[in-house]
């Protein structure tokens, strides 16, 4: 299915385009996109749809790998390799490997010889845990090639950070990437990451609280921009990245590195950039409780929508939280979030059979409310 484009409302489109300020299409290199037709979750994507998603977001390149394939990954990996070869350099392949499958190591070696830049491993979909002997062999291969290994580190699995840290120490030339902001381990892993040069996090996640912890507590050189297409849209994840980077005060060099420069170094086997220490949570400033109320209720509405339920009541409560006597910057922030929430309610009213239609405007409201210290986008 096509990546959901964020062009339905001109105002919303303009808000999201503000994330591109100072970054050219060539600066963007998405660390996390999928293609496939057989994932049991019902999502599908072709390489052309991923390229169209990049174009819609004003971005140039992406890593691409197979979606879940219950019958095995050989044909799916071949399809990814062929699509990347035909993309004019815009798509670079990762081989997806199921460690419990017979011949997993041979499949990994075959794909590397055919041009794969590294591996994607998914503990939930492919039903394995860490530590795992085949995963160790795959990381050893990546170490020999100075190549990336992208681990699913989002919902549906227990924590895996201890095993990742141990692998990173044993195989210092492997580039180990925790997908989905590493939410399984984000609360404790920061000190270990600060002393390791080869553990990274991609930003393919929607929760503003998780993203702010990522940007505040993980050194910027260890963060890689990612969309999760087709599950996420590049225009939205770029907006989320832009707001969080501004909230913690990252400079232009760090923003360019996160947007794609660091990933370029990783896939070409160069030494990663050291962009200094994490900013620290203190840079986020004091709480803005009015905005927090909006963020909490709009986030709850999104959780309902993701599960196919009616989000109307919580969207209305989030709108009520936007009502204020304030006429300062916080008042303007709440008014802007309210405009996005109105669009979310209208989207659901137009298509009540698809609660996920609220996601683009409701998520914009969440992101704005979660970053009250960042000036509002300047729109024409």
Image: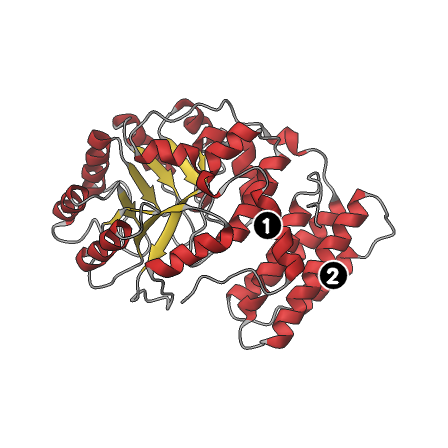
**Rendering quarter of residue 138:** top left
Tell whether 206 sits left or right of 65. Answer: right
- The spot of residue 288 in percent (x, y) is 74, 42
Front of the two marks 2 and 1: 1
Nearer to us in this view, 84 or 229: 84
- Residue tagged 1: 17
Q: How is the image coloured?
A: secondary structure
Is residue 209 visible in the rendered structure shown here? no
Nearer to us in this view, 356 or 196: 356
Tell whether 95 sits left or right of 204. Answer: left
Asked whether disc 2 touches disc 1, contact meaning CB atoms under 8 Å apart, the reply is no
- Badge 2: few (under 14), some or many (20 or more) residues near its Cα, within 10 Å? many
- The spot of residue 351 in percent (x, y) is 58, 76
Mark-to-mark CA distance, 2 and 1: 24 Å
| Image point (15%, 42%), residue name | 113
Q: Which secondary structure lies at badge 1?
A: helix
The dot on residue 319 is 2
**Rendering quarter of residue 34:** bottom left
**Rendering quarter of residue 184:** top left
The dot on residue 161 is none
State how many labels appear.
2
| Image point (30%, 26%), residue name | 169
- The spot of residue 322 in percent (x, y) is 77, 56
Is residue 246 visible in the rendered structure shown here? yes
Tell whether 86 sits left or right of 26. Answer: left
| Image point (72%, 66%), residue name | 316
Q: Earlier in the sequence, mark 2 or mark 1?
A: 1
Quadrant showing the N terminus? bottom left
- The spot of residue 377 in percent (x, y) is 68, 46
Nearer to us in this view, 58 or 3: 58
Image vertical order of residue 146 relative to residue 276, above or below:
below
Tell whether 331 sits left or right of 119. Answer: right
């Amino acid at each position: 299915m096509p990546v959901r484009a964020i062009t339905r409302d001109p105002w919303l489109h303009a808000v999201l385009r503000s994330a591109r300020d100072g970054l050219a299409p060539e600066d963007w290199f998405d660390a996390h996109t999928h293609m496939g037709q057989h994932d049991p979750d019902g999502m599908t994507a072709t390489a052309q749809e991923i390229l169209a998603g990049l174009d819609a977001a004003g971005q140039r390149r992406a890593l691409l790998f197979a979606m879940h394939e219950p019958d095995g990954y050989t044909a799916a990996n071949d399809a990814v390799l062929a699509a990347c070869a035909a993309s004019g350099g815009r798509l670079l392949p990762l081989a997806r490997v199921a460690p419990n499958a017979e011949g997993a190591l041979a499949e990994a070696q075959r794909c590397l010889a055919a041009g794969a830049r590294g591996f994607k491993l998914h503990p939930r979909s492919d039903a394995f845990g860490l530590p795992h002997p085949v995963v160790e062999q795959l990381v050893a291969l990546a170490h020999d090639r100075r190549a990336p290994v992208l681990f699913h580190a989002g919902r549906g699995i227990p924590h895996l950070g201890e095993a990742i840290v141990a692998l990173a120490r044993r195989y210092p030339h492997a580039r180990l990437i925790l997908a989905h902001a590493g939410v399984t381990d984000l609360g404790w892993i920061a000190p270990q990451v600060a002393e390791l040069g080869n553990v990274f996090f991609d930003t393919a996640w929607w929760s503003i609280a998780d993203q702010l912890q990522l940007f505040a507590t993980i050194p910027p050189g260890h963060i890689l921009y990612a969309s999760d297409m087709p599950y996420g849209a590049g225009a939205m994840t770029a907006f989320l990245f832009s707001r969080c980077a501004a909230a913690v005060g990252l400079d232009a060099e760090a923003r360019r590195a996160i947007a794609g420069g660091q990933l370029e170094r990783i896939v070409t086997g160069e030494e990663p950039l050291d962009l200094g220490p994490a900013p620290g949570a203190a840079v986020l400033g004091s709480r803005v409780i009015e905005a927090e109320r909006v963020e909490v209720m709009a986030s709850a509405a999104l959780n309902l929508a993701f599960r196919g339920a009616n989000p109307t009541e919580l969207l209305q409560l989030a709108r009520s939280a936007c009502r204020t006597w304030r006429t300062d910057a916080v008042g303007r922030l709440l008014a802007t979030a309210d405009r996005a929430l109105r669009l979310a309610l209208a989207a659901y009213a137009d298509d009540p059979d698809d609660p996920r239609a609220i996601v683009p405007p409701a998520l914009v409201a969440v992101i704005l409310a979660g970053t009250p210290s960042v000036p509002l986008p300047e729109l024409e």
